[in-house]
Amino acid sequence: MATREPSQRVEHVHRARLPGLYVGTYLAVGVNHPGWWGEGEFKFFIDDDDEFPTICGTGLEDYFCGSHDFNVPGAGYTTISTPFVGLNQVVKPDGLYVSQQRFSLYRWHLSDPIAFDQRLKVTVQDLGWQEDGAYMRRRDDIASVAYWYAAEPEGIKSEPMTIEHLDIGEATVRRAYQAALANSPREVLRGDR
């Protein structure tokens, strides 16, 4: 969940203090002011990074592959949805109560995970621009979910997975087949046959 540093208007998307792989981001933005909202840089502070991040993007819209602010001329904000990145929801003001715009964005790093050995901090600036092109610090509502894998479960010892762990067994397959014939998925769940 994003947390705010009020003096800097930076949202913390993720913090981890053990080795792992960062594999995805979901971001919800509730726009509270007029003007463009997507100029904030995504920053990945990896391991010993302090003031300067290892990865620093060129803007929120670029991180989510929405260059030119997801704008289709004549149509305005337009959703995109691909297997690895997208702006999958745009809630536009309805005009009746002049509600604020809301956006849902995602990006998966499954083919390019961000590895870290000691710690990772991911931030995004709450930054946009005004109609005259001047940058503007904003106070939008930002919520996030970070997806990552720890190299080891913290405090839990586990055995490596083997092919035997994946075998569901002949009895389970037989129950599933019988339930499918009887058109009753509950039979599979009960497991009493």
Image (tube, rainbow, N blue to C red):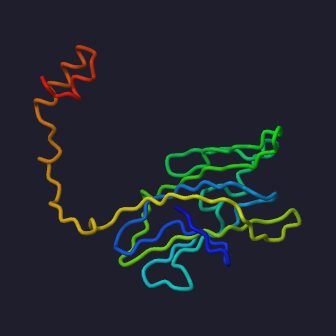
Q: Residue at x 22, y 20 (%)?
A: 179
Task: Identify whether 60 is placed above or below 82.
Answer: below
Q: Quadrant of residue 173?
A: top left
Left or right of residue 70: residue 117: left
Q: Quadrant of the C terminus?
A: top left
Residue 124 drawn at (x, y percent) = 60, 68
**The furthest residue to the right:** 132
Q: Residue at x 35, y 77 (%)?
A: 117
Residue 101 drawn at (x, y percent) = 73, 49
Counting every numbered tag in the picture gives 0
Along the line of sight, the residue nearer the viewer: 21 or 14 = 14
Residue 79 drawn at (x, y percent) = 65, 44
Q: Residue at x 79, y 66 (%)?
A: 129
Residue 86 drawn at (x, y percent) = 58, 49
Task: Identify whether 131 is placed above or below 103.
Answer: below
Q: Residue at x 23, y 14 (%)?
A: 182
Q: Quadrant of residue 110?
A: bottom left
Left or right of residue 1: residue 180: left
**The furthest residue to the top:** 182
Task: Identify whether 135 is placed above or below 72.
Answer: below
Along the line of sight, the residue nearer the viewer: 59 or 31 = 31
